[in-house]
Amino acid sequence: MERVTGKKPHHFLRRGIFFSHRDLNLILDKYEKGEPFYLYTGRGPSSESMHTGHLIPFMFTKWLQETFKVPLVVQMTDDEKFYFKDLSIEEVERMTFENMRDIIALGFDPELTFIFSDFNYIGQMYRVVARIEKAYTASQVKGCFGFKMEDNCGKWMFPAVQAAPSFSASFPHIFPSGNRLCLIPQAIDQDPYFRLTRDVAPRLGYLKPAVIHSKFFPGLSGSKGKMSSSVGAAVFLTDTPKMIKDKINKQAFSGGGATKGEQLLLGANTTVDVPIQWLRFFLEDDELLEKLQHEYMLGRLMTGEVKKVLIETLCGIVTRHQEARRNVTDDMVKLFSSVRLMGPAKGAQ
Ligand code: TYM
């Protein structure tokens, strides 16, 4: 990555937060030879506000877009949330709009970024979706996602909808000619979708998309797995500094000693400590992070002091995000989601 881009890799790469991939080497080899690619990522809008975990793939995607100067498509899977959750179409559409504002606030390039809702864009990519649906069998989809016969048909057909943006043929207004390679940043939970996609791609005459996976950002309680929006175990992008401070001070699982004396004597277990794990995601300064971990492990720092650094770091990120979000107008959402000539298609004009 460093050789190809001439840039220090993002701290998510340096620290193994993005820890696995398929065919990223191929993307980089081709890029080095002058063959560009495009980026695809997405969001399932099931809550008004995104949480800090959702930021991870988007922050990394932004870095990739800035570094490689390539087009990005962002799929808002409003249909997915309608099929999988107890939500009306109207509710999901409202959340989609709010989440789009959050994504735009992260600073993606308007000249190179297309953010679309499935309900609105599906007609344009339906031919690609249909080809994929015809290539998937119900038993493949069941094997991958574990659906039951009682599950609604929307769920069974949705994997083809999430697969379609992996193929540049879904975006003729961006890629009018030829197959273009795609790279999909995501957290590891999304991988089943793209294993199926990669399976059928050659049969359909499309290029297999490359993928890069991040680990999960843990919940405040430190439990393993996906940080859920529906439980109070997350910090949301709408939280106030006071809420962030209270959540971290009261709920963040500590790997430090139970008492000051114990911490001085035994030090902290930094592998289970949530504040340290969160700082690995959000504190960019490698030296400071290393120092904090070291001192904390040796018992020279107290949990409260580590939490204080985390609170400052996170409040900074969330407050800056809220300021940026206030400046995202309805017209900007319209612009980012409008079907317009972009990237190579615009260049060819
Ligand atoms: P969704 O809305 O559940 O999550 C959006 C993105 O955030 C990632 N993610 C996390 N990353 C780190 N730590 C966490 N705790 C955490 N929780 C969620 C997800 O992996 C995802 O990348 N079906 C998808 C939407 C989608 C998509 C895509 C995602 C459509 N096409 C292509 C990635 C790539 C969804 O519901 O994501």
Image: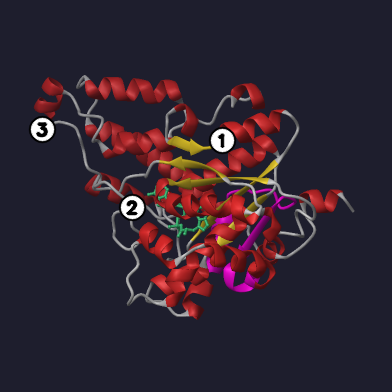
Residue 236: mark: none
Q: Which of 150 and 285 is in front in this view?
A: 150
The mark closer to the camera, 1 or 2, is 1
Q: Which of 179 and 285 is in front in this view?
A: 179
Q: What element carries label 2?
A: loop
Residue 259: mark: 3
Whether the magenta-drawn stretch holds residue 158 is answered as no
Above or below, 85 against 249 in this view is below
Indicate left or right for 84 with 270 as reference. right
Q: Which of 76 and 38 is in front in this view?
A: 38
- Amino acid bearing label 1: Leu
Does the rendering let one see residue 4? yes
Q: Which residue is drawn at 65% across and 25% down?
A: 4
What residue occupies the far front of the structure in this picture? 203
Residue 121 position in % (x across, y down): 65, 69
Residue 24: mark: 1
Indicate left or right for 226 with 48 as reference. left
